[in-house]
Image: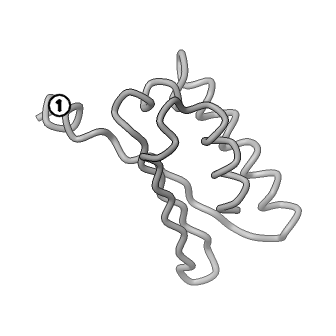
Amino acid sequence: MKHLLEYIILGITSKPENISIDEQDENGTVVLKLKVDDEDFGTVIGKGGRTIKAIRDLLRLKALKENLRFNFSVEEPAQKAANAN
């Protein structure tokens, strides 16, 4: 799952050196946490959330094929999280 996510994210981001993907197995569920550069955050989410929805759909198909459960999240950039408070 991590390899598929990495392949997709590397293809759409402008700063691939700042990508971090954490994959953990928690009670049979694959947990993927993605961190991208602040400038790439909007690209990953996409207009109206379309890009992130498409990424989730692809991951869902991969999980179904491999009979896995997964949870996927994108960490908000520090400056956006600070502005929300």
Extreme bottom residue here? 27
Question: From this viewpoint, which residue is outermost toward the right?
Answer: 65
Amino acid at dot 1: Ala
Q: Is residue 42 above or below residue 15?
A: above
Count of numbered badges drawn on the protein: 1
Above or below residue 55? Residue 51 is above
Q: Find residue 53 and report its horizontal and vertical position in percent.
A: 63, 34
Q: Kindly identify the residue that appears in the image at 65 percent across and 62 percent down.
A: 2
- What residue is rendered at 42% in x and 46% in y? 18
Residue displayed at 74% across by 52% down: 60
Does residue 81 appear left or right of residue 4 in this picture? Answer: left
Instruction: Quickly name the residue at label 1.
Output: 84
> Based on the displayed image, in which of its 4 quarters is residue 47 positioned?
top right
Q: Quadrant of the N terminus?
A: bottom right
Identify the secondary structure beneath mark 1: helix
Camera-side residue of 34 and 61: 34
Q: Residue 51 location in percent, x, y?
A: 62, 28
How did the renderer colour the structure?
one colour
Residue 21 x/y as whole percent: 51, 58
Give residue 6's position: percent from left, percent from top: 63, 52
Q: Report the front residue among 68 and 44.
A: 44
Mark 1 crowdedness (10 Å alpha carbons): few <14, some 14-19, many ≥20: few
**Position of 85 compared to 77: left or right?**
left
Q: Which residue is painted at 37% across and 47% down in the image?
A: 75
Q: Is residue 25 above or below residue 8?
A: below
Q: Is 83 positioned to the left or the right of 40 in the image?
A: left
Quarter of the image with the C terminus in it: top left
The quadrant holding residue 32 is bottom right
Relative horizontal placement of residue 42, taking residue 54 as reference (left or right): left
